Every structure is written in structure tokens, then in C-alpha cells.
Image (cartoon, grey):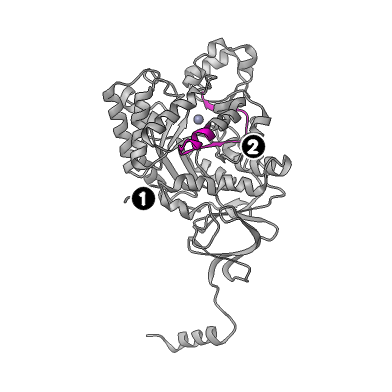
Amino acid sequence: MRSIYSLLALAVFLFGCAEPPTYDVVLTGGRVIDPASGLDAVRNVGIQGRTITAVSEDELRGVAQFDVSGLVVAPGFIDLHRHGDSPANYRAQIYDGVTSSLELEIGVVDVAAWYGERDGVTPVNFGAAASHPYSRDVVMFGRSTGLAANETSDKPASPEQIAATVERIETGLEEGAVGVGFGIVYTPGINAEELQAAFGAAARAGAPAYVHIRADPGDFSNLDEVFAAAEATGASLHIVHVNSSGGDRALQYLERIQAARDRGLDVTTECYPYNRGSTAIDSHQYDDWESYSDEKFAAFTWVDTGESLNRESFAKYRALGGTIISPATYSLETVKALVAHPMTIIASDGMWLTNGRAHPRTFGTYARVLGHYVREEQALTLNEALTKMTIQPARRLEHRAPMMARKGRLEVGADADIVVFDPATVIDVATFEDPARYSTGFRHVFVNGVPTLQDGAFVEAAAGGIGIKAESE
Ligand SMILES: [Zn+2]
């Protein structure tokens, strides 16, 4: 039974002037940009629990109020492609405006365990693909060797091995994986039969195939190979990092992808805003290393120490294994054109940290697009850039993971994944020589309503991230 005091308190609320706050959090006076709806105007944003419940010109009252006038308020960024998935990686991504972080290029070995380890303790939303290369390694080699080459990765699989690989992929899909990841360049033994069998598993689950295609052969057969598998099976297809896969021919790759779309294939692609790549030094990508010139060796960077290499140190580290940054093989003009192209989604390809270090894309991809390519180079507009970071990747995921229809948007009913940044100062500061530096210019980041970056500082206890998974039917 209600006491007289609570009735009195209610009377004060009803007839007095002190209305209780309606929202948990209110962001006041920011420039709200929602690329999905085209909204770009000063609005107040109200959050209740994990949901955006008001986007309004009216004054809103929150338990916590943030004055964000002069700042941009946008949906949190969705990174379809990054590898490093440690707490330190996630923290770097929060400083770069990312609220959903997915490993889709290669995927993970044990999907259920991977999601389980992150549940309830992760500051960003997280998701992964079932892995073709790791499944193949377990079947053919007995264990996964990551991106490093092993005795079987350049050998064709037998029909029994293909069936066993597909079975592992299917297990991952049943456990909720949001795609199937392929690194054909790392498993060059894969043939059309194996590719089609694995694409078939993706198609049956309504999950896209996320593919690192073979190195550029000069005739687009690396693209045509995956188009053929998509066509034969009906799988959706996403070509990762068209910048490093296509190099200075990447704009022609986009034309070829557009032609495939015009034929009715569901194909998308992405890029990161740098002209140097990074991968395992002992992968098949560097099988021809003994033929390199002294200048070429010197253009490689060993991530661990930042040193540039020579024939002796390359040989030593290749035997040891570890991560390398490759020489620039395409121009910054190409990078600029790719970042600005309407088809490309921005994705970081962020890497595992060694000694806290990795390719600078791990730390600075999103701030680099917003600060360097939007503000300094004016290669694209702020709205265009945000489209590539929010609604485009959300739409790529939504068919397989319908929960993504509530992300990548800043509207009533959407999940409160929000970034607040200063468009006049946002910039990457990570470099190839000194990569372990957080982007600057992001003021606040909310993940499902949980303040995760506040006044430019990471909130240590934040764990608002949820697993991005396929929902069981
Ligand atoms: Zn890759």
C-alpha cells in the first residue's frame, strides 16, 4: 500500500513544477547526423536504458546531461573487419569511435567459445564469422596455424576433407556466426570445388562470404573465381580491403564488382585509409621473398620493434613468425579515390597487438577518414564518410543478424550506440613508426547506452557490448 508520503510526492510532481527527468542520458544541442534518414540538424537526444527514445528539438531532461553543442552526434561506427580482439584492441577502437567490432575476414575457430568469452565483459559490440581457413587447417593439418603457411595450406583438399571442413563451418553458423570468413591468399590450395562447397554452407544459412581474394594476377581471375562461387550457390559476397587486394588497379576492381552487381549478384566491398598492408611474415603472401631486392627488404617494417628489414633479418623473422608491415604498393591517390567511392565501406583490418603495437590502421582508421580525408583533403563529405561507417555496414549484416536493423542509425527505437566528436579536430595520430597512439577528437562514446568514452577518456569498467549473432529462427 502506498504511504501518504509517496502520494504527497506524487502530488508535488503532478501539481508542482519539479518534473522528474524522463531520460537516463540526454545529449544537448549537438549536430545530429543520421545517414540512414538524412537527418543533419541540431537536436537533443534522449536515451533510456539501452535505447534512443527521443531525437527532438524540444528540451529534454536527463539524469545525466551532456552539453554537446558544436560537436557531431552520430551512430557508433561498425567495423566489419578487424583481427585483434583483445581488451587493448577494443579500447583502441573505442578511442576511434567504433561501437561494433567484427572479425569477418578470417573468422574464429570456435564460434561458441569466442562469443562466450566476451559476453558481459566487453566494451564494444562483438561478432565473428565461422572460419574457412582455420576449419580447413584443423581438418587437414590437425590444428590452425593462423595466417601462417603450413604443409597443407597450398595443397588441394580431398572430398572427405572438404566435407569435414564444411561441417565445421556449419557448426559455427549454427552457433550464431554472422558470416563465413575466407583467406584464399592464405590457403592457395583451395580449388573451385572446395570454394563452392564452403560458399554453399554460407548460402544455406543466409550468411555472406567475406573473402580475402588471391593476389592480383592481372586478369581479374581472382575476382571472377569468387563471383563464380557466389553465382553457383546464391551466397552473398563481401570482398575485403579492395585497396590492398587491387592496389593501383583497385578502381578497376570496383568497376568489375559493379558489373557483377548489375548482373544481380549481392557483392559489397570495403577499404582502409592507408597504402601499406600488414600480415604474418610467414604467410604464403611472401613465398617469393628470396627474390626481393635490397630496397624491397628495407621497405618492410617489423611491427614488434619498428625496425626496417634486410635479407638476413627477413629470413630470421620468417623462420620465427610474427607480424610485418608491407611496403607501399599503391599510391595515396588510389587510397583517396577508394575512400571517397560510394561503394566502399570503411573497415580497419586492425591487427593483433605485439608489444602493444600494430599497423596504425588498428588505432586510427576512422579518425583518419574523418580528419584527413574529409576535413583536410575534402575527398568526401562528412555525411558520405559517416554513411560508410554506419548504415552501409549495418545493412551488410542485417539479413543474417536482424538485430543490426537497430544499429548504424540514430533514431527513436535504435540501440544507443552513439559517437560524439569534434569535426574540427578529430584526427588519427598513430604512425607506422609509432603506432600505439589513440585517435583524438572523440568526446563521448556510448555502447547500448553505457558511457564507454567520457570527456575523451576510456571508462575502465565499461562492458556495454553485446554479441552480434544470427538469431535462431
Ligand atoms: Zn586480408
Report whether 468 appears left or right of 358. Answer: left
Q: Nearer the viewer, residue 369 or 85?
A: 369
Task: Looking at the image, tell me whether mark 1 or mark 2 is earlier in sequence order.
Answer: 2
User: Are the residues tagged 1 and 2 within 8 Å (C-beta)?
Assistant: no
Residue 225 falls left or right of residue 375 = left
Q: Is residue 172 above or below residue 196?
A: below
x and y percentages locating residue 174 in the rendered image: 31, 43
The residue range painted magenta reads 257-280
Write down the quadrant of residue 146 in the picture.
Answer: top left
Residue placed under numbered mark 1 in the picture:
471
Asked whether the viewer can see residue 214, the reply is no
Instruction: Tell me the CA gap for discs 1 and 2.
Output: 37 Å
Please, is residue 150 above or below residue 472 in the view? above
Whether the residue under disc 2 has CB within 8 Å of ligand 1: no
> In which quadrant of the rendered view does residue 44 lie?
bottom right
Farthest residue in the top direction? 291
Residue 17, relative to residue 122: is it above or below?
A: below
Amino acid at circle 2:
Ala
Q: Quadrant of residue 302?
A: top right
* Residue 425 percent across, percent down from the top left: 71, 48
Q: Which numbered circle lies on residue 270?
A: none
Point 61% across, 11% down: residue: 293
Q: Which residue is mark 2?
A: 430
Closest to the observer, 461 or 70: 70
The one of 190 and 105 positioned closer to us in this rendering? 190
Q: Quadrant of the N terminus?
A: bottom left
Answer whether residue 276 is magenta in the image: yes
Look at discs 1 and 2 and give the one toward the viewer.
1
Q: Give above or below for 411 relative to 206.
A: below
Residue at the image point whose x is 36% and y is 19% from the top: 152
Residue type for callout 1: Glu
Residue 100 within the segment the image draws in magenta? no
